[in-house]
Image: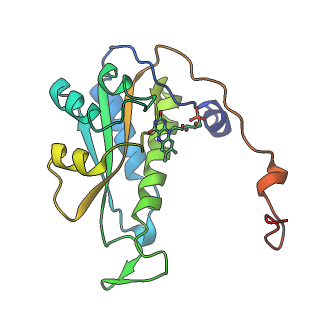
């Protein structure tokens, strides 16, 4: 699949078939995470692949009932939890190199996007889930203090196509030479 086709064709998927995802496919997806760019190649991203139905159900309890991705947490055969090691990305000799301090959110975001695009190209669905009780998820997964959960995605074969979504026009967010957003 052409990259632009994958970028434009990927949609959030919230309904999954129970069909398993092969180890080979999973490996390919982990390679996509592995090759994501990161601050000074610090590679703070870490992944937990959850297959155990009990842990999937526990993780689902970290989502509010209003989260539209809730049912997909137990429906999809796999849950991928994207974590970041703190104090690495954006740091030089233990000191923050920029006012943005920890670039963990950025690096894990790049890793997640790689995963979502390759999953889509392989015929799989994902939905980035960020609205949940992160502390609760970290407890369930047994994370140490220096690692945090950033986002989760169910992973599996699509039971439905994604919905239609709109995007802003380029003229609404692309500026030339100087910022012209606040008119
Ligand atoms: C950081 C982030 C957090 C998100 N959190 C949730 C979530 O908690 N629940 C959910 O159903 N979708 C979530 N989404 C999916 C967005 O709603 C979705 O990407 C957006 O509406 C655009 O639709 P599309 O992905 O189909 O293009 C999240 C997406 C991102 C990037």
Q: In this view, does 82 lie to the left or right of 179?
A: left
Q: In this view, does 28 lie to the left or right of 169?
A: left
- Which residue corresponds to the image point at 25% horizontal and 51% vertical from the top-left? 135
Name above or below for residue 45 compared with residue 11.
Answer: below
Q: Position of residue 109 (x, y in %)?
A: 46, 53
- Which residue corresponds to the image point at 42% horizontal and 39% vertical from the top-left? 129
The color scheme shown is rainbow
Q: In this view, does 90 lie to the left or right of 58?
A: right
Q: Position of residue 171 (x, y in %)?
A: 84, 52
Quadrant showing the N terminus: top right
Name above or below for residue 117 compared with residue 144.
Answer: above
Q: Where is residue 27 in the image (x, y as percent from the top left)?
A: 32, 36
Q: Where is residue 11 in the image (x, y as percent from the top left)?
A: 57, 30
Residue 96: quarter of image: bottom left
Q: Nearer the viewer, residue 90 or 32?
A: 90
Residue 102: quarter of image: bottom left
């Amino acid at each position: 699949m052409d990259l632009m086709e994958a970028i434009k064709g990927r949609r959030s998927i919230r309904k999954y078939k129970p069909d398993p995802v092969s180890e080979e496919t999973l490996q390919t997806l982990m390679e996509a995470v592995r090759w994501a760019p990161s601050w000074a190649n610090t590679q703070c991203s870490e992944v937990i692949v959850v297959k155990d139905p009990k842990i999937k159900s526990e993780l689902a309890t970290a989502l509010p009932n209003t989260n539209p991705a809730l049912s997909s947490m137990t429906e999809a055969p796999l849950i991928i939890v994207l974590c970041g090691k703190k104090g690495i990305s954006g740091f030089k000799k233990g000191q923050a190199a920029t006012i943005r301090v920890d670039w963990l959110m950025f690096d894990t975001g790049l890793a997640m996007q790689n995963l979502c695009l390759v999953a889509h190209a392989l015929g799989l669905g994902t939905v980035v889930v960020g609205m949940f009780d992160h502390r609760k998820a970290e407890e369930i997964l047994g994370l140490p203090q220096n690692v945090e959960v950033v986002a989760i995605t169910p992973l599996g074969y699509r039971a439905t196509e994604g919905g239609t979504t709109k995007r802003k026009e380029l003229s609404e967010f692309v500026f030339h030479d100087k910022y012209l957003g606040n008119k």
